[in-house]
Amino acid sequence: MADSLIKTDAIIIGAGPCGLFAVFELGLLNISCQVVDILDKPGGQCAELYPEKPIYDIPGFPVISGQELTDNLLEQIKPFNPGFHFNHMVTALEKVDDKTWRLHTDGDLVFEAGIVVIAAGGGSFQPKKPPIAGIDEYEGGSVFYSIKRMEDFRDRDILIVGGGDSALDWVLNLEPLARSMTLVHRREEFRAAPDSVSKMHKLVDEGRVTFHVGQVKELKGENGSLQGAVIKGKESELDVTCNTLLPFFGLTMKLGPIADWGLNLEQNLVPTGTETFETSEPRIYAIGDIITYPGKLKLILSGFHEAALMAQHAFHYIYPDERLVFQYTTSSTDLKKKLGVA
């Protein structure tokens, strides 16, 4: 076990956008980081669920994909040389002394750090499956709960089920590639952004998308290959030809071991203050979608702000005898040297 001990200033749980930007903010303050993530690559939900899906609310980028954002963040933190440990779930957290936390992973790694930053999004996320008999046999070949590469869906007869942003976004993004596109939602009203709903209705009016009010009752096919679906409406049923089903019913978030770490939780979220983003345990911080506070918005840009304030406070734990001097990257020679642009 001694061979697997890794000592660092900060251990960050979660390699999504907020976790990656935390490396940058901590690095500017000479705080070294190790990053642990249960996924097999960086990017979190952005890279895992919608790497090619456009994001429109990142400051300075009119449009950027989840993968592009991840790549840019990785490039930004290169000067700080963080350690990454993928396919590892943190299973235990224990206090060594007043200055050190020890973390264990299911891959037999042990970390000791002065601070812990929980940037785990909503915890582990799993898609909500529709209650359709026999759907399991089509998963991975004809039924998909996330889209990694849009080109994989070219020339397919696609049936999308759902009424939220994900469902409408993928109708709009995949329609140009698909041979046919059908959308099914249980009612006429949608939870998605009004602009997306308007664009979808325009495609329906143009005959490029078929929309049905109802629910998928049955799937038709054999040997894991989908051939069609039965849609149950209010008064009748109809058959829809499709070889691809994309159900978007949202995600089920599970905190996993974090729920057992002695933090004060509110509805499976970690409460923090808005000045330091420290949890109920000293030296443990939380940022991003996993936290709650009055006025909290689950936006990437909010997580970036939280990471910056967290780092300013964490500095005093790592360097208790030093005075923190706030500096701007545009004017500080010291910071430019750290970034390799001096």
Image (cartoon, grey):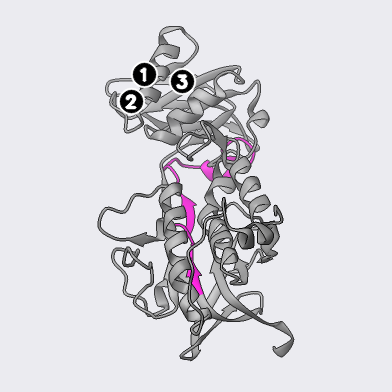
Residue displayed at 63% across by 46% down: 72
Q: Nearer the viewer, mark 2 or mark 3?
A: 2
Separation of residues labelled 2 and 3 (CA atoms): 29 Å
Marks 1/2 in contact by CB < 8 Å: the verdict is: yes
Secondary structure category for the residue under label 3:
strand
Residue displayed at 48% across by 34% down: 56
Q: Amino acid at mark 1?
A: Ser
Q: Which mark is residue 153?
A: none
- Judge whether residue 253 can be spotted in this image: no
Separation of residues labelled 1 and 2 (CA atoms): 6 Å
Residue displayed at 56% across by 35% down: 64
Q: Quadrant of the C terminus?
A: bottom right
Residue position for label 1: 198
The residue nearer to you, when weighing 198 against 152, is 198
Asked if 28 appears above or below 133 in the picture, the reply is: below
Crowding at dot 1, Cα within 10 Å, few <14 / some 14-19 / many 20+, comes out as few
| Residue 86 image point, x, y percent | 66, 63
Secondary structure category for the residue under label 2:
helix
The residue nearer to you, when weighing 111 against 304, is 304
- Judge whether residue 200 can be spotted in this image: yes
Magenta-colored segment: predominant secondary structure = loop
Residue position for label 3: 239
Q: Nearer the viewer, mark 3 or mark 1?
A: 1
Of mark 2 and mark 3, the one earlier in the sequence is 2
Report the magenta residues as a range.
116-143
Residue 125 lies in the magenta-colored region? yes
Residue displayed at 58% across by 77% down: 9
Residue position for label 2: 194
- Quadrant for residue 158, please give it: top right
Asked if 33 appears above or below 58 in the picture, the reply is: below
